[in-house]
Image (spheres, helix red, strand yellow):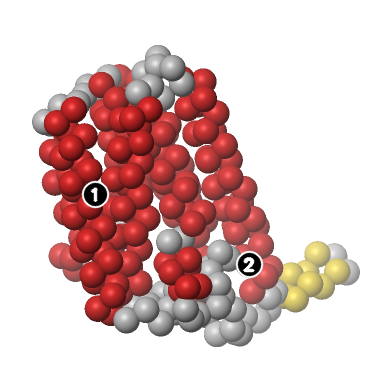
């Protein structure tokens, strides 16, 4: 059984590898958490939101995914290790520079977010400390709660009760994403054959890889679109 390692992945080789490396649906999904967090204020400041989105795109969309591919080649790209390392390093540095500039405008407490994010990206994707940070809980906190918290803080330099509830909601959504995607990734990337059948009365249906992945992957396809649409709608509603 051979299939693409992700529903958005293209065939290996050339520019297609870099498209796959970005994990476009999931990158947009997690950037949506940044925007949703920013919308806890009555009127957003677009420039500050733009800086937060740029920082997270560099850190999550590029650096984290480059490090993830470096460890085990889950997307089966042909990008050389040296390029993956360079891309990850430059993206993390770029995210830090953007974060420092944003902190100078809003609050120097923003440096805490830079430090936490700069540590968690390699700690999660390279599975430091025996994979302690590479877990469902840390995925939910890092890719759901943390972006929302940073997005909110980037607007006013403060965190209120509403922000905490929004962050908790984003973390739970991110946890649901992880629960849905984990078995799909296993089947697409590791399982070599599937056998069995479903019996319902006189109806016998063979179990295939599609049988096992169709529902969770279909939910993921809808959810990333839903999250992006929700974030865009909220930003428009809060636009000055």
Can residue 190 be seen in the rendering of this structure? no
The residue indicated by pointer 2 is 212
Among the two numbered marks 1 and 2 on one chain, the one whose residue lies closer to the N terminus: 1
Front-most of residues 19 and 3: 19
Seen in the image, is 30 located left or right of residue 131?
right
Distance from Cα at disc 1 to Cα at disc 2: 38 Å
- Image quadrant holding the C terminus, namely top left
Above or below: residue 71 compared with residue 165: below
Can you give x and y, in whole percent of width and height, for residue 125 in the image?
28, 64
Q: Quadrant of residue 103?
A: top left
Can you give x and y, in whole percent of width and height, for residue 174 in the image?
42, 46
Seen in the image, is 109 located left or right of residue 222?
left
Label 1 SS:
helix
Label 2 SS:
helix
Q: Nearer the viewer, mark 1 or mark 2?
A: 1
Can you give x and y, in whole percent of width and height, for residue 120 in the image?
21, 53
Can you give x and y, in whole percent of width and height, for residue 91 in the image?
26, 58
Per the rendering, the mark at residue 95 is 1
Q: Say few, some or many: other residues with alpha carbon within 10 Å of mark 2 (under 14 / 14 to 19 / 20 or more).
A: some
Q: Residue at x 31, y 53 (%)?
A: 58
Can residue 15 be seen in the rendering of this structure? yes
Q: Quadrant of residue 134?
A: bottom left
Above or below: residue 187 compared with residue 150: below
- Image quadrant holding the N terminus, namely bottom right
Q: Residue at x 46, y 60 (%)?
A: 23
Above or below: residue 83 compared with residue 180: below
Disc 1 to disc 2: CB gap under 8 Å: no
């Amino acid at each position: 059984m051979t299939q693409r390692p992700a529903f958005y992945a293209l065939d290996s080789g050339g520019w297609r590898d870099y498209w796959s490396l970005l994990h476009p649906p999931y990158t947009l999904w997690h950037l949506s958490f940044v925007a949703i967090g920013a919308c806890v204020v009555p009127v957003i400041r677009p420039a500050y939101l733009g800086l937060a989105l740029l920082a997270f795109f560099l850190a999550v969309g590029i650096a984290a995914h480059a490090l993830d591919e470096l460890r085990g080649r889950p997307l089966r790209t042909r990008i050389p290790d040296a390029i993956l390392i360079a891309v990850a390093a430059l993206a993390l540095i770029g995210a830090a520079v953007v974060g420092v500039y944003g902190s100078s405008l809003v609050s120097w407490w923003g440096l805490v977010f830079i430090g936490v994010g700069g540590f968690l990206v390699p700690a999660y994707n390279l599975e430091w400390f025996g994979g302690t940070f590479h877990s469902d809980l840390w995925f939910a906190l890092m890719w759901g709660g943390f972006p929302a918290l940073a997005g909110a803080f980037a607007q006013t330099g403060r965190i209120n009760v509403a922000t905490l509830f929004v962050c908790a909601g984003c973390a739970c959504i991110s946890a649901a994403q992880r629960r849905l995607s984990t078995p799909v990734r296993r089947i697409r990337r590791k399982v070599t054959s599937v056998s069995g059948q479903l019996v319902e009365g006189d109806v016998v249906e063979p179990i295939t890889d599609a049988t096992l992945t169709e529902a969770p992957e279909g939910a993921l396809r809808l959810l990333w679109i839903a999250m992006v649409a929700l974030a865009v709608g909220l930003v428009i509603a809060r636009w000055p």
